[in-house]
Structures are given as structure tokens and as C-alpha cells.
Amino acid sequence: MLYAIGDIHGCSRELELLLARIYPKTSDTVVFLGDYIDRGPDSKGVIDIILDLQSKTNVVALKGNHEQLFLDFLESPQSPGAGVFILNGGGATLASYPGPGGTFEIPERHIEFLYGLKLKYETATHFFVHAGVPLKPLSEINDADTEALIWSRQPFLSSDYRWEKTIVHGHTPVPSPEILANRINLDTGCVYNGHLTAIEIPSGRLIQVPRESAASRVQVHAPSNEHRVAVRFTGRLPMHVKMPDGKSRVFETLNYNQFGVLMREISSAGSAALLEKDQVIEGTIGPSGPGAIQFQGTVARVESRNNVRLYGVSLSRVTNGNEGREWIERPLTGSTSKK
């Protein structure tokens, strides 16, 4: 028997309950569709469970866009991908790997797991992938389609294109599993207080567990346990802000965390302030493309340094593409370390 499991996003308890209901045999195959980490309370625990399961049954672990962003962060903490990782719930992932003195330590076996993830898996009848596939025959998919496999939404989601096999995917949360003629979507938003869903193939039987806890945000205390602090990461990310006149103005981040940014005007010397304190703004953060983040926030402070105007912005809404979900986490503590 084969089982496919949708997006988990740090919900380790729900994964344990789901696997207990499936109870895979040594001859079975369990395909994980990616997005094991970020946003939920126990990303590390999720990976531990999957690694442990490998000794009991055949496991196929696919790469999601969140795992790719985590790798971007580990390889270059000041890269645009690293910034998108933090702003897409990566703070919760780092918080699940606490080290001494507020550091974060990622076990080598977890790093090996991340680098060993597959982009796709297929049987005679089904094609498994994290997000979706291009509108072309599956036999023509190649390395140039990597972004589509881990980031796809449109036109994949609305297409009636009939591939040679049924596409089984996650990535875009839906209230209940989508069982369509050409594809099956198993991301039922567990981390958003939905369900964690698996499908049994070839029977088509669905197995689900609800989110056990109503708590959807991660609270991490400073080592002293006296107060919460938020680590800021240095990095240059473009911010396209919609101005009152309807036009978009480009700013740049100097640093950021998962619920606030410090950004600067581009060439602001000698000009009046473009934004005012307490002004509500919205736009996008990050390079253009599928990883761009839509945001809404409030200008918390305005200051000038060396004739450059800086703005501290408190984020109130963060969504990834057309996912249609809001996610602002509580502060995390510490700094990153990689072993």
C-alpha cells in the first residue's frame, strides 16, 4: 500500500497521531509531500519522526518550498532566500533547534535530510510533487522546472489539463482534500487549525486528524525567561510599497525579523519623508517571483541617518503569494549556528 501525506508545517503531534492511524507496514510506502517545517511549534520533531520512520517502512520525502528556503538560510543567512525564510515562518523552525546560550544548532543528520529531499516521485498511476507541475507531458519535466515543482499555484490549480498520471500535491491550503479528475490536493491547513491529511493509494481512502491545539503561534522566551526578544537578521530585501497616489515606491530592508522590518528610502537625500509615523502601508517584500511576500504594516518610527531616511515597520499581516493566509509569529530568541 502507498500513503501520501500533505503539508505538516511543524505539527509533530498531529503527524504522530496520523501515522498511528495509518500504521504502515514494512512493505508499504509513505510519501511526504514537503513543507515539514516553519510556522508550527515543532519542526525539528517532525523531521525526527520522518527519520525514525525510515527504519520501519519505505519513506519518500519530497522537497517543499519551505525546505528550499531553509537551505537558502543555512547556506547564506543574508541572502534574499534567507529573508523570505524568516518572514515565512522560519523563526518557528529555528526556535525548535535551541542550543546553549540562545544559539540554534541544526543536527548534521537533519541537514543531510534536507539536502537529500527529492523533487518528485511517481508510480505507474500517480505523480507526487510538492506544489504542482507545468502544463506539459510529465515525461518532458526536467531541471528547468524545479521552481514550478515547489512553488506552483496558477495556472496549475485552475487547469483542466490531463497529464499521463494523477498529480498528488500540497502547498496550497484548502478546507478539505481536493479530489479532481487530474489532481489531488492534500494540504488541508493543519498549522492553520485545519487537518493533517493522508490518502491511501490505490483505494483513495482519506485519513485525517484535526489540529490538536488551538494555539497557532509559537512563543519562545529569552534564556533568562524574563521577557521575549526577537532576533533581527541583517539583509537587503526589496520592499515595494503602495503609496497614497496609487504608485509603488521601492525601499530596501536593512534588517528584519518575522514581525518587523527596518527599511530605508532609496536616494532620499534632500527630499521630504515619503511615509509618516503611524501610517498603514502595504506591498510586497523580497525579489519578484513566487517567493515574494505580501504584507501590511504600520510605520512605527521615522528617522534620518547620514541623509538617508529610515522607517521601522511593524508587520500586522504577512501572506505568501496567493496562499490567502495570515501569519505573524511571536518573537524567537538566539542566533543561528550550524554544526
Image (spheres, rainbow, N blue to C red):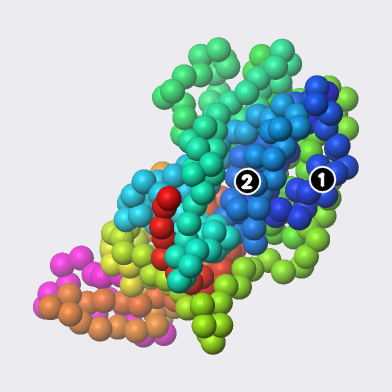
Q: Quadrant of residue 251?
A: bottom left
Q: Nearer the viewer, residue 294 or 21?
A: 21
Which residue position holds label 1? Answer: 18
Tell me if I can see residue 281 in this picture: no
Query: Element type at marker 1?
Result: helix
Query: Element type at marker 2?
Result: helix
Which sits earlier in the primary sequence, circle 2 or circle 1?
1
Give, as a single range, the part of the protein colored magenta. 263-278
Instruction: Please indicate whether residue 105 sits to the left or right of residue 64 in the image.
Output: left
Q: Residues within 10 Å of mark 2 (few under 14, many from 20)?
A: some
Q: Position of residue 283 (x, y in %)?
A: 42, 62
Magenta span dominant secondary structure: loop
Q: Nearer the viewer, residue 101 or 279?
A: 101
Instruction: Please indicate whether residue 281 sits to the left or right of residue 30 in the image.
Output: left
Residue under the point 38% across and 70% down: 232
Residue 140: in magenta span:
no
Which residue position holds label 2? Answer: 47
What residue type is disc 1 on?
Leu
Q: Nearer the viewer, residue 132 or 110?
A: 110
Q: Position of residue 62 (x, y in %)?
A: 60, 33
Distance from disc 2 to disc 1, alpha carbons, whole Å, reads 15 Å
In this view, which residue lies farthest toward the front? 100
Look at the picture and state if 105 lies above or below 48.
below
Look at the picture and state if 6 lies above or below 145.
below
Quadrant (top left, top right, bottom left, bottom right) of the N terminus: top right
- Tally the marks: 2
Instruction: Please indicate whether residue 290 sits to the left or right of residue 251 in the image.
Output: right
Tell me if I can see residue 202 in this picture: yes
